[in-house]
Image: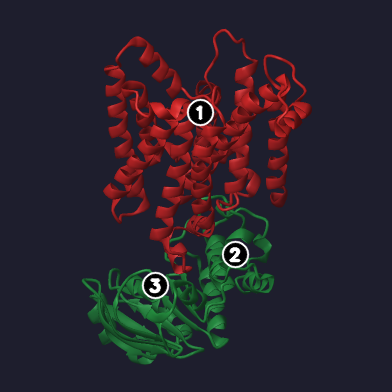
Chain colours: A green, B red
């Protein structure tokens, strides 16, 4: 679905290459400042980069911004509404790249993100967890082929962490793709098909959770001794 | 309800226009006066309605719409409910342009429209300076550049006032700056209308960007909206609107700041849906204020800009008080 080759942004990320098939979920992991957000933003068309990105057989540079936005949706790390908008309006905002108000897409996104009970409320009156699901519904309403989520579960409690991860997993299953930056390595091991471990703007390890989440890899990148037990349910990954 | 807001404001504006045409020192039948004027009949009613009240009403509407819409657009662009159209620097530029007419007697061929013409040129120059200074930076810097140019032209205006050739020129200049739509003809409207249409069109073309910007620049850009170009078009449109309105009517304070505030809750806080109702409400408000000006005793006329400032400032204080409580 997407194939990235030698992606480079001066002083931020260097020579990043990977590919993702439809139906897969890729977790981008690594310490703070390792270039996770930069990678997602460059794929979303916000940052300029060098290198080749091929999306569904097309060079991504040849797409118009609108065309690209119809296919790739970004859920940024921090999101705040400047105005006291209603939940319906926020979700409908996701249709902007299409220039319509497709009720089916909007209702589908509302159900996928589980925000139906929040309809009619103002977004600035919601709790952090409720708001995170509304931002997610906004991206889902655009029905992108590839969904980029930048730390979607940061600052959420256990219930919402699981619910957002389940939504993303289900979304990927329907022949879509999901790339998410994530700090919780246990959840990454549990939900992602592929992992990309980043360090100082470079890919340190790439592949299935078993190949990436080794004590040697994680200790080297995070600079602390790490205990890994992927056989336990759920997987355990913690600093010693 | 939100869909009814624009038609409702349109109805309100129509009612205000009728009242405006009927208000004046002498009682004149509005409809027959208008019909006479359109038909070219040379009656007293035709002259009063067509030559005095109609231009005055239309100017008040145009100026109010320009201020209301530019305020709504800038507040949406900067994601800040306290942004004011004068931040673009165009209004001070227009004031300086008009002031130089009083000082140097430029464009004497243009007659009564000379200050407006010079004001437009002043607004245009201030705008070019502002865009040149801002270069390709972010909108917050564009507004900083506007503020810088505004300060510069403000200083130049103070200099003009300081060296006014005589007390009468100074009085004329100060009165003009206080803002008014009286004693102006339809030729002023022909100066204002193109700027109004162009500026309004520029802002209207970027309404999706204003909606997208509700969730920040990253979200807007990730949705395929061209943020840098779009934000410049919005600033340009707002500057055209406010520059032209100041050039024609002097500075009418607080309308651009307060009107979007009052209308926002009625459109569910949507910055894109705020544009037209703000323009219509601004038009009604300025026209209403001008009706009040005409109803006050005629010997010491209060200027329109003074009245809107007197109404607007307490409203503004109330809005801050309300917001302050909300964030406590």
At horizontal 56% and vertical 23% (from top left) the residue drawn is B182
Which residue carries the number 3 mark?
A45
Image vertical order of residue B216 relative to residue A170, above or below: above
Judging depth in this view, the residue of A104 and B117 nearest the camera is: B117
- Judged from this view, the residue extending furthest toward the left is A11
Residues marked 1 and 2 touching at CB (< 8 Å): no
For the residue labelled by badge 1, is the local secondary structure a helix, a strand or a loop? helix
Which residue carries the number 2 mark?
A91
At horizontal 48% and vertical 42% (from top left) the residue drawn is B241
Share a chain, discs 3 and 1?
no
Judging depth in this view, the residue of B129 and A163 nearest the camera is: B129
- Circle 2 residues within 10 Å: few <14, some 14–19, many ≥20: many
Which residue carries the number 1 mark?
B317
* Relative to A225, A194 lies left or right: right
- Circle 1 residues within 10 Å: few <14, some 14–19, many ≥20: few
How far apart marks 3 and 1 lie (CA) works out to 42 Å
Judging depth in this view, the residue of B31 and A74 nearest the camera is: B31
Image vertical order of residue A130 relative to residue B132, above or below: below
């Amino acid at each position: 679905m997407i194939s990235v080759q030698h992606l480079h942004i001066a002083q931020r990320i260097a020579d990043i290459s990977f590919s993702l098939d439809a139906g897969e979920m890729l977790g981008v992991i690594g310490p703070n400042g390792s270039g996770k957000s930069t990678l997602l933003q460059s794929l979303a068309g916000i940052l300029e980069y060098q290198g080749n990105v091929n999306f569904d057989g097309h060079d991504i540079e040849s797409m118009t911004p609108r065309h690209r936005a119809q296919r790739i949706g970004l859920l940024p790390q921090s999101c705040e509404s400047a105005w006291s908008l209603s939940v319906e309006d926020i979700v409908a905002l996701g249709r902007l790249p299409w220039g319509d108000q497709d009720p089916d897409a909007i209702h589908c996104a509302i159900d996928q993100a589980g925000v139906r009970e929040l309809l009619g409320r103002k977004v600035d009156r919601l709790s952090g967890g409720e708001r995170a699901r509304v931002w997610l519904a906004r991206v889902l309403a655009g029905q992108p082929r590839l969904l980029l989520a930048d730390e979607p579960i940061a600052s959420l409690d256990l219930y919402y962490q699981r619910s957002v991860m389940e939504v993303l997993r289900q979304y990927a299953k329907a022949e879509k793709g999901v790339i998410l930056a994530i700090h919780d390595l246990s959840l990454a091991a549990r939900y992602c098909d592929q992992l990309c471990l980043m360090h100082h703007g470079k890919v340190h390890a790439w592949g299935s959770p078993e190949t990436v989440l080794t004590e040697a890899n994680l200790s080297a990148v995070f600079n602390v001794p790490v205990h890994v037990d992927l056989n336990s349910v759920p997987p355990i990954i913690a600093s010693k | 309800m939100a869909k009814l807001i624009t038609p409702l404001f349109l109805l309100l504006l129509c009612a205000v226009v009728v009242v405006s045409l009927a208000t004046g020192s002498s009682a004149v039948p509005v409809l027959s006066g208008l019909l006479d004027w359109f038909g070219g009949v040379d009656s007293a009613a035709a002259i009063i309605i067509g030559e005095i009240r109609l231009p005055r009403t239309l100017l008040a509407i145009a100026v109010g719409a320009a201020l209301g819409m530019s305020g709504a657009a800038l507040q949406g662009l900067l994601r800040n409910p306290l942004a004011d159209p004068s931040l673009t620097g165009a209004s001070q530029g227009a004031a300086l342009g008009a002031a130089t007419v009083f000082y140097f007697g430029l464009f004497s061929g243009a007659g009564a429209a000379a200050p407006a013409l010079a004001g437009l040129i002043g607004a245009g120059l201030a705008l070019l300076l502002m865009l040149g200074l801002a270069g390709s930076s972010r909108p917050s810097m564009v507004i900083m550049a506007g503020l810088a140019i505004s300060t510069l032209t403000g200083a130049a205006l103070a200099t003009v006032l300081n060296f006014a050739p005589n007390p009468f020129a100074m009085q004329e200049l100060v009165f003009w700056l206080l803002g008014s739509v009286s004693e102006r003809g339809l030729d002023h409207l022909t100066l204002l209308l193109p700027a109004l249409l162009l500026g309004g069109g520029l802002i209207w073309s970027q309404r999706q960007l204003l909606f997208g910007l509700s969730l920040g620049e990253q979200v807007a850009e990730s949705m395929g909206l061209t943020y840098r170009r779009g934000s410049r078009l919005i600033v340009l449109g707002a500057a055209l609107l406010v520059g032209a309105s100041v050039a024609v009517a002097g500075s009418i304070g607080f309308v651009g700041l307060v009107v979007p505030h009052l209308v926002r809750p009625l459109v569910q806080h949507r910055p894109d849906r705020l544009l037209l109702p703000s323009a219509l409400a601004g038009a009604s408000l300025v026209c209403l204020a001008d009706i009040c000006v005409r109803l006050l005793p005629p010997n010491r006329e209060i200027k329109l800009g003074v009245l809107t400032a007197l109404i607007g400032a307490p409203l503004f204080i109330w809005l801050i008080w309300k917001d302050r409580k909300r964030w406590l």
